[in-house]
Image (cartoon, grey):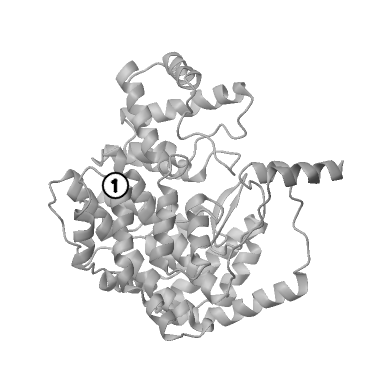
Amino acid sequence: MVFHKGASLLTKLRSRAVQQPGLRNYVRWFQVQTSSEVDLHSQLKELIPEQQERLKKLRSEHGKVQLGNITVDMVLGGMRGMTGLLWETSLLDPEEGIRFRGLSIPECQNLLPAAKSGGEPLPEGLLWLLLTGKVPTKEQVDSLSKELRNRATVPDHVYKTIDALPIDAHPMTQFATGVMALQVQSEFQKAYEKGIHKSKYWEPTFEDSLSLIAQLPIVASYVYRRMYKNGQVIPMHDSLDFGGNFAHMLGFDDPAMQELMRLYVTIHSDHEGGNVSAHTGHLVASALSDPYLSFAAALNGLAGPLHGLANQEVLLWIKSVVGECGENVSKEDLKKYVWKTLNSGKVVPGFGHGVLRKTDPRYTCQREFALKHLPEDPLFKLVSNLYEVVPPILLDLGKVKNPWPNVDAHSGVLLNYYGLTEARYYTVLFGVSRAIGICAQLIWDRALGLPLERPKSVTMEWLEKHCKKAA
């Protein structure tokens, strides 16, 4: 049965490779790596040695190859455009969007196992893909789901630590605090203190990462139920998958909401290494901080208004449009409200991206979900109208490189439709999702022995002198 599914998968990939030549190298890699082993740790033990050799060869044969020139604009502009990180799990193309181990979001939707026929991909399947580079079988995903459920036990002190905070503390503050409280169980820290050899660092990192990923929905749902549902906690279901269980513990058992959560977690899981949360997790981990410390740091970056907090801001802004103009606002009045926002010195949340130069594919797949499940929802119609109204206005300003909607432009409306209306909480959902990508890469950071990150900084005086010499 497993062999048959593997053969069917390769047939699909070969067909896609004919249509999309850029996929051929990825398909070849999948073919070489095909395996029916259901244990994720065992697969990594097989894969890591060859990837270690691949990195050594790359460094020894091509270490002096230049990747580009650094300009003063890059130094002063937040290092944008600099190629300076190794991030194996995903790659973001400005025109094409994100690819997870070479696969686009639509390809992941087609190829990764789902909870039901024709449904959204299971997040566990994406975790397997990010870690191994292989599309898993349903049996492998079910095995990983079971392992995550077995690891999903949160110590009592974590709840007590969260309870020590004011109940109206921001959900991200409570969530990050809970992650820090989990850190006392770190296997990596214990192994390091005992003197583990650096070639084995990845193994306790793997243990911590899978336990962390498994425990996050429990901590996150505890924060939600504490803040908004009078502390009435819902226990994990012993047979649901990762995304379905997360929705269940939050209090949403509508099958469509569980499907949305599977899609949400999958598409928010990784976005290459340069974004604030991913880079922060990588940076802190490069000091050999354990996955709990590293991910807590990543969460603090994600909580910023220019990063993960944006999904909260989008829904609040959309509701402000409805509050002033009504649900059935005309496009002309919508244009006026957009201009009012811009003229007040604010941005229109949900539009633009630091890398992308087209509509975010994550926005597109959420729109397709809405067209399938909630085509008549007034807020969805408003989001659709914003897609037509906002980009031309931003282009008229002449300052925006990407006027198109990003992932945050749509997620809040979908969550709101199914009853998760508390916008302040949305970034916590993002955080649970992002752990999959950050932890998958962290395991490979340790397996490949990536060094402490330490870029060179300079002063404005140094830049001024350098530019004078160059002139």
| x, y percent for residue 464 | 76, 41
The answer to whether 449 is drawn above or below residue 306 in the figure is: below
Where residue 385 sits, quadrant-wise, is top left
Quadrant housing residue 182: bottom left
Question: Is residue 133 toward the left or the right of residue 466 in the image?
Answer: left
The residue drawn where x is 33% and y is 55% is 176
Residue 95 percent across, percent down from the top left: 62, 44
Q: Is residue 198 left or right of residue 146?
A: right
Q: Is residue 251 left or right of residue 24?
A: left
Above or below, 245 against 191 in this view is above
Q: Quadrant of the C terminus?
A: top right
Compare residues 117 and 24 and report the one nearer the observer.
24
Residue type at the position of mark 1:
Pro
Q: Position of residue 242 (x, y in %)?
A: 31, 61
Q: In the figure, is residue 102 to the left or right of 457?
A: left
**From what the image shows, is residue 272 above or below residue 320?**
below
Which residue is at a point 57% across and 62% down the rendered structure image? 87
Q: Quadrant of the N terminus?
A: bottom left
In the picture of the structure, the residue carrying the numbered disc 1 is 171
Q: Secondary structure at mark 1?
A: helix
Q: Is residue 242 visible?
A: no
Residue 229 pos. (x, y %): 15, 46
> Which residue ends up furthest to the front in the rendered image?
461
Within-10-Å neighbours for mark 1: few <14, some 14–19, many 20+:
many
Q: Residue at x 34, y 16 (%)?
A: 325
Label tally:
1
Q: Is residue 386 visible?
A: yes
